[in-house]
Image (cartoon, coloured by chain):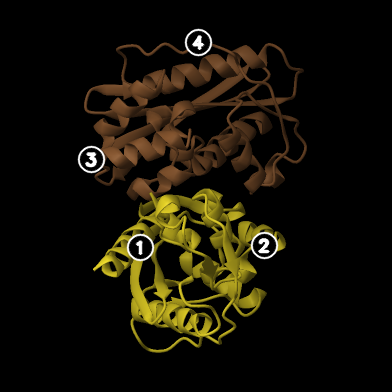
Chain colours: A yellow, B brown
Amino acid sequence: MIHEMLSNYQLILASASPRRKELFSLLGLNASIIPADIAEPLTEEKPHIQAMNHANNKARFVLNTVSKGQIVIAADTLVAIDTNVLGKPKDEEQAREYLRMLSKRDHIVYTGICIGLNNHILCDYEQTTVSFAAITENEIISYLKTGEPLDKAGAYGIQGYGSQFITGVHGCYFNVMGFPIRKFYELLQVLLRSLEQ
Amino acid sequence: MIHEMLSNYQLILASASPRRKELFSLLGLNASIIPADIAEPLTEEKPHIQAMNHANNKARFVLNTVSKGQIVIAADTLVAIDTNVLGKPKDEEQAREYLRMLSKRDHIVYTGICIGLNNHILCDYEQTTVSFAAITENEIISYLKTGEPLDKAGAYGIQGYGSQFITGVHGCYFNVMGFPIRKFYELLQVLLRSLEQ
């Protein structure tokens, strides 16, 4: 299990996201937080490529600041609907626009995840389909009042008030929270096995 | 949204489950806890019927102890795989047996949910398919050491160390945590609308 595999390593989480920190606690992990303060402009590339690139940039940035033997973990989450890729909304007006876009539809959440150790960075991504209920203009107004949409990719938090708009998830739930736990476990097995060789 | 609909009601959660309490906090709800201490023997009935019956019994039990106008919320979660219905394991040996049963397979989680107000109890259920990775005997030993399996239906907690064994969820994630939030929102709309008439 993850906490056993990592018991001899110092962990650095390259993210200021309280959700990711919470998931680390769930797994019984202690990590230092060193947020990678990097601008992440959206591009025309496919969303899973962008998410992996962002995570890779974060991992590389933080890996340069830590000691040898420390494990750096970075992730980046994006929401895709039709040809639109949604990051964090820049203001309430954009949050409103995103929520109208998601209403009564399925969308896909992508998280790029990278694990860095010494000179190696291993990356992968996870994708999950999320089904949103029809939400009314009144619900959007109420939801904006909670303050939750503003710092979340796609303008909603599944682990919060936003939970009541979600009719279903298809794939890894933790990916939607911003950190695909099973994928992390699998990547970690690959990384640590490669060290033994 | 739920916290607005319930702002004028006193809420009673008929469950001692810390997961359900946590989900109430996520939704911005304050509830008093009055656990319904009722034995829940498994029967030959279909799992969704059993889950609803158990939730109904809990709701009815607590509704008899509270004042008029208070809303009682009860839920019961079961895991079904093939023709087996799994509640909480009675000991480590049964937990081990359950985990072996779930390994590398899909199973279904059912939660019965009941909302009681005055003389009315409204019930429904939610079902979610969960995909489990292949888990090794060593992982089972490690997982049992965490102590997590013993108080959970099906011997795993999705919101804990157990998260690393889950490859996917199909349906409501919160149902697997023991409380189907979207279903609760919908039931609440039905209940409160019926009061207005």
Q: Quadrant of the C terminus of chain A?
A: bottom left
**Which residue type carries mark 4?**
Ala
**Looking at numbered disc 1 in the image, what kind of residue is underneath it?**
Leu
Q: How crowded is mark 2: few (under 14 residues within 10 Å), some or many (20 or more)?
A: few
Counting from the top left corner in percent of width and height, residue A18 is at 61, 62
Q: Separation of disc 4 and disc 3 at Cα?
A: 29 Å
Mark 4 vs mark 1, foreground winner is 1
State which chain disc 1 sits on: A
Quadrant of the image occupied by residue B85: top left
x, y percent for residue B184: 54, 37
Q: In this view, does A4 lie above or below A32?
A: above
* Amino acid type at mark 3: Arg
On the question of residue A104 being in view, the answer is: no
The residue where tag 1 is placed is: A188
Query: Do the residues marked 3 and 1 share a common chain?
Result: no
Asked if badges 4 and 2 are on one and the same chain, I answer: no
